[in-house]
Amino acid sequence: MLFLASSLSNLPVITQRRENLGFVKEAVFDPKVLKLVGVLIQRSILQSQAVIAPLDILKISSGFLLVKNRDVLLPATEIVRVNKLLRDKKRLIGMRAETLEGRSLGRVYDLLFDEVDGRIVKFYLRSLVNEKILPVESLFQVEEKRLIFNIEEIGKEKANLPLPAVE
């Protein structure tokens, strides 16, 4: 099943025994592998944040995130990749998006990802004047602070498709 990263925000995290572990604060995606690498959990005001590895997530639904038990909650420092991304403040959401020619497409405001393997399927971009949804296949390069898309190629492919039959 496919989910928007934004749809995870504030979802309750529960165990199979219906124990409430907190709420999803953020889904953490690695820009290098374009994949979900962790889910940041806010437990309570007095407790520090924790991270759940994607392999420990049993189910994502529109109403909750299900995990086996409370042992899956780890300090962010224990998942090295997540810790580094959080420390370096590297987030795909919020990154600038541009074409190969350097034309601005806006910023990434959401991601569509596959629940099974965590891979990003689509990028949701927004600028002052419009919004675009681009497939991951159109991503040409990931740089330090921007994503570069080859959207001209996608336009050519669509232009070469046969027109639908009209009666």
Image (tube, helix red, strand yellow):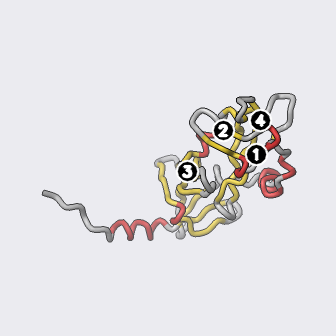
Marks 1 and 3: which is nearer the front?
Answer: 1
Residue kind at label 1, given as amino acid type: Ile
Q: Kindly identify the amino acid type of the residue bearing the numbered disc 4.
A: Gln
Q: Earlier in the sequence, mark 2 or mark 4?
A: 4
Instruction: Give whichever of 160, 167 is nearer the camera.
Output: 167
Q: CA distance from mark 2 to mark 4?
A: 13 Å
Which image quadrant: the C terminus? bottom left
Place of residue 101 in the rendered image (x, y in percent of width and height, measured from the top left): 53, 69
Residue nearest the viewer, comparing 65 with 147: 65
Mark 3: few, some, or many residues within 10 Å (few <14, many ≥20)?
many
The answer to whether residue 22 is left or right of residue 131 is right
Sequence-wise, the earlier of marks 3 and 2 is 2
Q: Amino acid at mark 2?
A: Leu
Residue at mark 4: 42
Q: Are marks 2 and 4 in contact (CB under 8 Å)?
A: no
Q: Please, what secondary structure does the residue beneath circle 1 have?
A: strand
Mark pair 3, 2: CA separation: 16 Å
Which of disc 3 and disc 1 is earlier in sequence?
1
First in residue order: circle 1 vs circle 2: 1
**Disc nearest the viewer among 2 and 4:** 2
x 70%, y 58%: residue: 30
Q: Position of residue 78 (x, y in %)?
A: 86, 51
Q: Residues within 10 Å of mark 4 (few under 14, many from 20)?
A: many
Disc 3 from disc 4: Cα separation: 22 Å
Residue beneath disc 3: 112
Q: CA distance from mark 1 to mark 2?
A: 10 Å
**Outermost residue to the left:** 167
